[in-house]
Image (cartoon, rainbow, N blue to C red):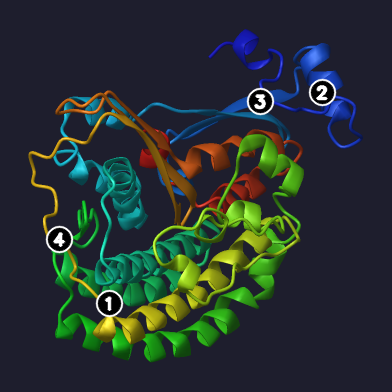
Amino acid sequence: MTQETVHNEPVVPGFDTGSVEYGDFYTRHFQEGPTENTLILNMGPQHPSTHGVLRIVLELEGEYIVRSEPVLGYIHRMHELMGEVKTASQYLPNMGRVDYLHALAWNWAHVGAVEKLAGIEVDERGELIRILVTELNRISSHLLWWGAYLLDLGAFTPIMYAFDDREEIMDMLQICTGSRLTYCYMRFGGVSHDINDEFVTRLTDFIPYFRKRLPMFKALVTDNIILRKRIEDIGIMDEEMCRRYGATGPVVRGAGVEYDVRRAEPYSLYPEMDFEVPTFPECDAMARYMVRMAEIEQSLKIIEQCLERLPSAAGKHLVKGAPKPTFKPPAGEAYFAVEASKGKVGFGLICDGGAKPYRVKLRAPSFCNLSLFSECAQGVLLADAVAILGSLDLVIPEIDR
């Protein structure tokens, strides 16, 4: 990359050239041109803290970031195009490969859009199972983020605890889905298999056990002064910035905004569930950390409610007369959104009545959340870039979809 391409006009939308905080940087480095004191550094595309093939071009003055630019597309897999050359049933396994850490949320976005278009109603039991496994998968995703984030910051022990508990969750999900990571459990009209007594027993035993672990996580990590010094007042992303870039999930809730698709755009039986939407107003990396830790407790609360309702739930795990693999959605348009561990997942679908959809569009939260990084990282230390990036909980295959 030449210096001419690096020192061009900033591409950050909404960059405030007159602000006290960024004005000097803008004047010196974008209007007056480069100086002999700046250094161009590539972070990635192979770097442990990017958790995937992500490249960020950094312009540094000493150890401070003057400008940063994410470079995407290294693992682009054409998921949207594949959605247009496969039937709706053939496309089901693709969703487990977009965000493989919360695959069941993407499963749900796909089947939800098709069901909305085709007017398919899911039985109460099927809806409860969907909520139960999706919330369990959310906890699994947050645990992996928690362990990996702390590993990025230099702490090794927490990831051992995180993977210990996550292993139990993966064992349970394997019982009902048949998979441990890239799930393909949802079907048009419900789920592929009903849950059994072994799954219910293990989950019932896991909830009180895991609740006892959370205070230990708090004492070991959350209240640790070393962690707080690393991530408090770092990566400030306020409400206005989040709205400009379309940030959702823990990122926007860490800016004090109570936006959760399960409440803002209700679907399934979530309106009947008793749970809170955790928010923290500090807008820093610590606030985003606290949101995810609080969401783990709320997911446990939702899972308990599902278990209580399941024995008396009406209907079956898959509705009678559910669509066959040769099913063709009717002509029309549909959009369905779900709340994934990283934010709002959207599935847009346009069908013309043929065997394959005319257009498929995926809304990935990590893409929007990453967009904040360039503006947020200006003027911070290079060491803090890892703390900011990790607080976004990015999954690169979701961005390069």
Identify which amino acid the numbered label 1 is placed on: Glu
Q: Position of residue 388 (x, y in %)?
A: 62, 49
Mark 4 and mark 3: Cα distance apart in space: 54 Å
> Amino acid type of disc 4?
Ser
**Disc 2: which residue:** 26
Q: Is residue 377 visible?
A: no
Residue 39 marker? 3
| Relative image position of residue 28 (x, y in whole percent) | 84, 20
Viewer-proximal residue among 264 and 18: 264
Disc 3 marks which amino acid? Leu
Determine crowd level at label 4: few under 14, some 14-19, many 20+ residues with C-alpha closer than 10 A. some
Residue at the spot x=50%, y=83% of the render? 214
Task: Check if mark 4's residue and mark 1's residue have beta carbons within 8 Å.
Answer: no
Residue bearing the label numbered 4: 192
Q: Earlier in the sequence, mark 2 or mark 4?
A: 2
Q: As rendered, which of 338 and 178 lies closer to the eye?
A: 338
Q: Is residue 337 visible?
A: yes
Among numbered discs 3 and 1, the one appearing first in the sequence: 3
- Vertical comparison of 274 with 252: above or below: below
Element marked by disc 4: loop
Question: Toward which corner of the image does residue 293 lie, by quadrant?
Answer: bottom right
Q: Mark 1 = which residue?
A: 168
Between 374 and 323, the residue placed more toward the observer is 323
Distance, label 2 to label 3, CA atoms, is 16 Å
